[in-house]
């Protein structure tokens, strides 16, 4: 195991009276792919959003690459360049080309010149198999292509860790494979990744560790074989049994 890239300790999150995260501890090591599974409402996406402070944890600590994400002195926009995020919805600007979407943060946050940003943007689009779509607008692209542009936008900043929040759930089934293919390539290149997804086949094949969450807590974690074939906890067993019946 490499050194921990992400260290989240004692994370609680309240939305009013709703206690969504109840003291979650999560370590993610360099080059590790951690897959987070669990029923809807278990706190998976909230945990991801706390890691890069899209949601403010109510208490706890989060350190990413040695940066205290909850310290008021931390430049959060700069810190977020180390922790890329891909969402369920692609969040692309419709009036900008694929290249324009990818280069925007490179110029605004990364401080790159137009020429530098465009060179990095073209390279990122090539990496997700969209070199020939750089000048297309989102409306001219399929859902799978739009999601791959969103991944290119995140990896262009050369983050240390990538967070994926249900990256395929808004896609038609025949487009899912192209996005998982890009994620597999990132995995093989050594990217540290935390993935929340229902793609259990991908979890079995690609994850180093599977984390099962329920009711705002990590109930059990282990290798894909341990979690999918010999889960120890009753709640994990019930969840795995349910998804295997579908």
Image: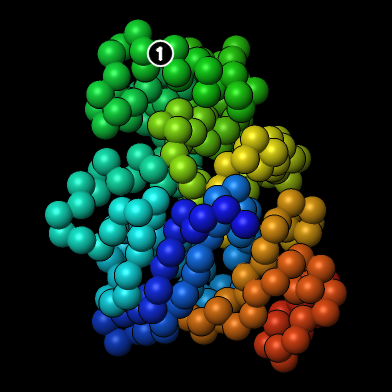
Where does the N terminus fall, quadrant-wise?
Answer: bottom right
Question: Residue at the spot x=29%, y=28% of the render?
Answer: 110
Occupied quadrant, residue 6 = bottom left
Residue 180 vs residue 160: left or right?
right
Specify whether residue 40 is in view: yes
Q: Is 136 in front, or is 11?
A: 11
How many numbered discs sit on the rendered protein? 1
Residue 156 x %, y %: 45, 28
Left or right: residue 110 versus residue 21 is: left
Q: Quadrant of residue 195?
A: bottom right
Instruction: Please identify the residue farthest to the top as the structure is shown.
Output: 115
Q: Position of residue 45 (x, y in %)?
A: 48, 64
Q: Residues within 10 Å of mark 1 (few under 14, many from 20)?
A: many
Q: Residue at x 46, y 43 (%)?
A: 160
Residue closest to the eye, 221 or 149: 221
- Residue 56's x, y, as percent? 28, 66
Q: Residue furthest left?
A: 73
Apparent side of residue 141 relative to residue 105 in the rendered image (left or right)? right
Residue found at the very far bottom of the displayed protein: 234
Quadrant position of residue 159: top left
The residue carrying mark 1 is 118
Q: Helix or strand or loop: what does disc 1 sit on?
A: helix
Whether residue 21 is visible here, answered yes or no, is: no
When the figure is inspected, residue 29 is found, relative to residue 17, above or below; the finding is: above
**Residue 29: percent from left, percent from top:** 55, 56
């Amino acid at each position: 195991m490499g050194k921990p890239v992400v260290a989240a300790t004692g994370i609680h999150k309240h939305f009013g009276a709703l206690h969504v995260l109840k003291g979650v501890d999560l370590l993610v090591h360099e080059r590790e792919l951690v897959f987070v599974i669990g029923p809807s409402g278990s706190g998976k996406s909230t945990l991801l959003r706390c890691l890069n402070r899209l949601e403010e944890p109510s208490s706890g600590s989060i350190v990413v690459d040695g940066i205290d994400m909850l310290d008021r002195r931390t430049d959060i926009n700069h810190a977020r360049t180390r922790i890329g995020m891909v969402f369920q919805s692609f969040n692309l600007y419709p009036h900008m080309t694929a290249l324009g979407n990818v280069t925007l943060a490179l110029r605004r946050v990364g401080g790159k010149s137009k020429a530098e940003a465009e060179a990095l943007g073209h390279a990122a689009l090539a990496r997700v198999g969209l070199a020939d779509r750089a000048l297309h607008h989102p409306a001219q692209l399929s859902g799978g292509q739009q999601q791959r542009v969103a991944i290119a936008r995140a990896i262009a900043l050369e983050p240390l860790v990538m967070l994926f929040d249900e990256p395929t759930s808004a896609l038609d089934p025949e487009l899912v494979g192209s996005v998982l293919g890009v994620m597999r390539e990132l995995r093989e290149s050594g990217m540290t990744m935390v993935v929340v997804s229902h793609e259990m086949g991908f979890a079995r094949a690609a994850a180093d560790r599977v984390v099962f969450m329920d009711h705002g807590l990590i109930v059990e974690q282990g290798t894909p074989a341990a979690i999918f074939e010999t889960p120890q906890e009753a709640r994990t067993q019930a969840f795995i049994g349910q998804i295997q019946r579908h």
